[in-house]
Image (spheres, coloured by chain):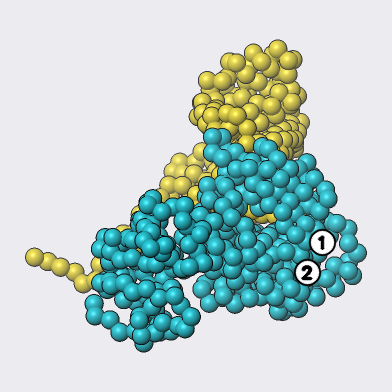
Amino acid sequence: MASVTYNEVTKRFGDVVAVNDLSIHVEDKEFLVLVGPSGCGKTTALRILAGLEETNEGTINIGERVVNDVAPKDRDIAMVFQSYALYPHMSVYDNMAFGLKLRKVPREDIATRVRSAAEILGIEELLERKPKQLSGGQRQRVAVGRAIVRDPSVFLFDEPLSNLDAKLRVQTRAEISKLHQRLKATFIYVTHDQVEAMTMATRIAVMNFGVLQQIDTPQNLYDNPANMFVAGFIGSPSMNFCNASLAESNGTLTIDTGGFSVPVPKDREDLYREHVDKPVIFGIRPEDMHDTKYVPPGVNQSVMQARVDVVELMGNEIFVYLKSGEWEMTARVDPRTEFRV
Amino acid sequence: MFSISVKWERRVKIILGGAWMLMISLAILFPTYWIVLTSLKHPKEILERPPIYFIDYLSFHSYRNVWNNPVIDFPGWLLNSFVISISATLIATIVASLSALAFTRLRFPGQSRLGVLVFVAYLVPASLLFIPMYLMLAQFNLLESKMGLIIVYISFTLPFIVWMLRGYFQTIPKDLEECAMIDGCSRVGAWMRVVLPLAAPGIAAASIFAFTNAWNEYLFAWTLGGAASRTAPVGLTRWVFLDMFFWGELSAGAVFLAIPAVLMYFLGQRFIVSGLTGGAVKG
């Protein structure tokens, strides 16, 4: 088992900077999720760690060892690809045994390890099949199985769930989390899906344009996003933003958007005071907007008026698209809420 | 107005289509039939008027005469053909596989331009290269040698099969190779264990193409070859003395020549179809 460190890593493809001065330390046995929109450099960062791309600057450590010049096969890692990358000409068993055979593991050991990994993943009866005879979900399991049998220090996942249908994705998500608890290895997982990131990660690293935006636990990212990008990226539906100004009267701070105004909570006043009389951006999460009748207890209320544009009934909740002045926003409200559209 | 029912329209289509196919098949198959027939006729029957289209007894006279002839060493030339074609095929396939891999998998300056150049090289007509080839072989003392012909054939087949294999390798996902490299292979190991087995149909198709190209070649074998490197297609012309054509022997020789190529295509047709379309459709 091992920690992983990116130390001021930069990777350029021609003029494009795919990864820009990235520094991350991943603890041993941690489940780190790299998340961001497509093209943000997260996959490149993973591929650098795997040894499939070279860095232009900076160093990569796995454990104590600097691995920049170490071949992928000698990095003691295993990777699950988005396409699963199962060898089409080999049976499931041979796919899983391939890495062990190359490492000259005795035949009986290979059989034991493949069978026990197959058992963990519930694919014992598929061992003789060829990849093309498997469904997407089964292929995905085989790809994970192939990583498990190698018993590496670090597991790398490159969007492993994105080719699965929605239901299977949720199920497999939980299984990968379980696997992490069971194997007690370092997991580094790349996804563009913030729900995957929130549900599985010990810590999340949010990237955009090759730059690390913030790295923290899921809850801290949600509660204290470092910038507008992180605030907008984490959470679904994403946070509403509108231009506003911050005014002070009689010692209380108020955010005024033109359409409505919101008092700043007492405990935040000192934090915001330096921005008084300056333009600010007001952000509010859809789940923090409620019908006045169904406000949960303990919420610091302020009331706004808005016109309802579109309503999406989800059963357990309602998404309401609102208009207030020139601002459009989304609210995620209690299903008992009543509207006039 | 007159109209026909859908049923009749279908029947007419089948009949017309069938007739058309039959005509094309006849045009293609009749010459082959005629060669086989001539090779099995008795010499006296060959030039009979009106021509004999069906024979009721098989004569192997021509075959015997081709195979066991004190003056004309057809089996020896057939052997030359085999040695030259198989060497050219083996070398061309190995070189083409490696260069196609380099084109699809490595990043190097001028990659795409070089790829186009390879294709342009294929488009240059062989007859244009005839004089430079002759001069080059003369320079290296390779005229009239088997080695000379092998080199010439490799240079002609290489561009096309590099192009063909490039298309084939492009359909093999890069992930597989990268996965193999993480699993424990070196780059070359990943090619050998993962890419090449998957490319086998494409490589088989390429080598069949290279083989038949060299096997059937006449012009260069005739002009650049000599007594020691005479191939069977060139040797066959020995049965033409001035204005005398030994049709039976010529036909029997042609049949001998056709057998390996036909066998190869027959055994490899599965590969040829998937190899030639491999670059076109992603499966």
Asked if residue B224 is positioned above or below residue A91 in the image, the reply reads above
The x and y percentages for residue A311 are 31, 76
Is residue A162 or residue B3 the one in the foreground?
A: A162
Q: Hey, which quadrant is residue A81 in on the image?
A: bottom right
Q: Are marks 2 and 1 in contact (CB under 8 Å)?
A: yes
Q: Earlier in the sequence, mark 2 or mark 1?
A: 1
Name the residue furthest left: B1
Q: Which chain is cyan?
A: A
As drawn, the label of residue A184 is 2
Return the residue at label 1. A1
Give the residue drawn at x 70%, y 75%: A178
Is residue B131 or residue A66 the one in the foreground?
A: A66
Q: Is residue A168 left or right of residue B2?
A: right
Q: Which chain is yellow?
A: B
Chain ID of residue with mark 2: A
Give the residue drawn at x 37%, y 67%: A262
Give the residue drawn at x 19%, y 69%: B4
